[in-house]
């Protein structure tokens, strides 16, 4: 089943909605129905999902009505399924015109930063998002740990007279939102096409034999290991499986030696031989030419 991927802010997660027989394209703004009311979002892609993992709005309504009529056992465990709501319509110029302009957004951010400073909170404000109904404001921030922002919420609620939400995001989400260029000179992958972040570990740098470059050269502007390290990880792992272990005894053209180093991408190893009078000699051996 094909569904649309909708995002309400670049730092927010992606939500699924049914196409509702609409001709939609990536980048278009749409109005969708959520648990919190109508929202304005951007189509960031399309996905094929398992239809059995979702239920429609009608099915959810019937299920709730049955529960209210006590025709459903509340104690009976059922498989949790997500409700797949339809896109209401494509956003019009009038819809877009209802949203706060840049000046209003800057003023909201400025006031929130002022209150953060006043409360001496260890948090960095990143962005603000207004709901389509204009009754809710969400502020996104990053912090090293948990932040007690209850008093801040009171300040903001009193000032804006709206429902206030504070969402803590990660440094990778910040980089995705801000955008920049990587060491390669190209636009950040997270800004351009990555939708969901995957775990990038130090094991990937070891398998690809780039650990010696240092954390500064291997980290993106977010301060974490670059996402591109994950792209070829599986390929490197398969190549590494063909390599002998360092310290392993090998036989090369009738001579016995010890593996002292390896080069995964080149598929070569450095083998040390004890050459008698001349002492120890190290020779680079191409594995593709010396297959057992």
Image: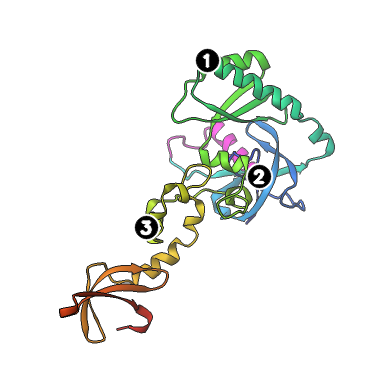
**Where is residue 90 shown, x and y percent of the image?**
78, 44
* Disc 2: which residue: 6
Left of 217 or right of it: where is 11?
right
Q: CA distance from mark 3 to mark 1?
A: 44 Å
Q: Which of 245/79 is in front?
A: 245
Is any atom of residue 220 visible in this view? yes
Query: Relative to 19, does residue 265 appear above or below in the rendering?
Result: below
Which residue of the protein is positioned furthest toward the front in this rendering?
Answer: 278
Which residue of the protein is positioned furthest toward the bottom in this rendering?
Answer: 254
Q: Which residues are magenta?
A: 57-76
Sort mark 2 into few (<14), some (14-19) or many (20+) by Cα contacts within 10 Å. many
Figure coloring:
rainbow
Does the segment drawn in magenta span residue 75? yes
Mark number displayed over residue 119? 1
Does the segment drawn in magenta span residue 243? no
Q: Secondary structure at mark 3?
A: helix
Mark number displayed over residue 206? 3
Name which residue lies at 84% across and 34% down. Answer: 94
User: Earlier along the polypeptide chain: callout 3 or callout 1?
Assistant: 1
**Where is residue 192 shown, x and y percent of the image?**
63, 51
């Amino acid at each position: 089943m094909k569904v649309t991927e909708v995002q309400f802010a670049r730092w927010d997660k992606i939500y699924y909605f049914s196409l509702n027989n609409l001709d939609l394209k990536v980048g278009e703004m749409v109005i969708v129905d959520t648990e919190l009311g109508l929202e304005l979002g951007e189509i960031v892609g399309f996905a094929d999902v398992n239809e059995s993992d979702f239920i429609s709005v009608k099915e959810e309504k019937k299920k709730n009505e049955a529960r209210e009529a006590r025709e459903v056992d509340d104690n009976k465990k059922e498989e949790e399924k997500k409700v797949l709501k339809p896109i209401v319509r494509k956003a019009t110029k009038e819809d877009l015109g209802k949203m706060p302009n840049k000046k209003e957004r800057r003023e909201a951010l400025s006031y929130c930063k002022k209150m953060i400073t006043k409360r001496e909170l260890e948090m960095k404000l990143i962005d603000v998002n207004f709901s389509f109904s204009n009754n809710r404001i969400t502020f996104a921030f990053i912090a090293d740990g948990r932040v007690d922002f209850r008093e801040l919420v009171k300040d903001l609620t009193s000032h804006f007279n709206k429902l206030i939400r504070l969402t803590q995001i990660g440094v990778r989400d910040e980089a995705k939102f801000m955008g920049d260029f990587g060491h390669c000179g190209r636009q950040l992958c997270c800004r351009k096409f990555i939708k969901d972040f995957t775990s990038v570990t130090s094991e990937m740098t070891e398998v690809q034999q780039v650990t010696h470059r240092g954390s500064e050269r291997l980290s993106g502007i977010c301060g974490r290991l670059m996402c591109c390290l994950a792209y070829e990880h599986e390929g490197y792992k398969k190549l590494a499986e063909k390599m002998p272990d360092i310290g392993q005894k090998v036989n090369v053209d009738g001579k016995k030696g010890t593996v002292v180093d390896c080069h995964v991408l080149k598929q070569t190893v450095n083998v040390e031989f004890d050459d008698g009078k001349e002492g120890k000699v190290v020779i680079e051996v191409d594995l593709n030419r010396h297959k057992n």
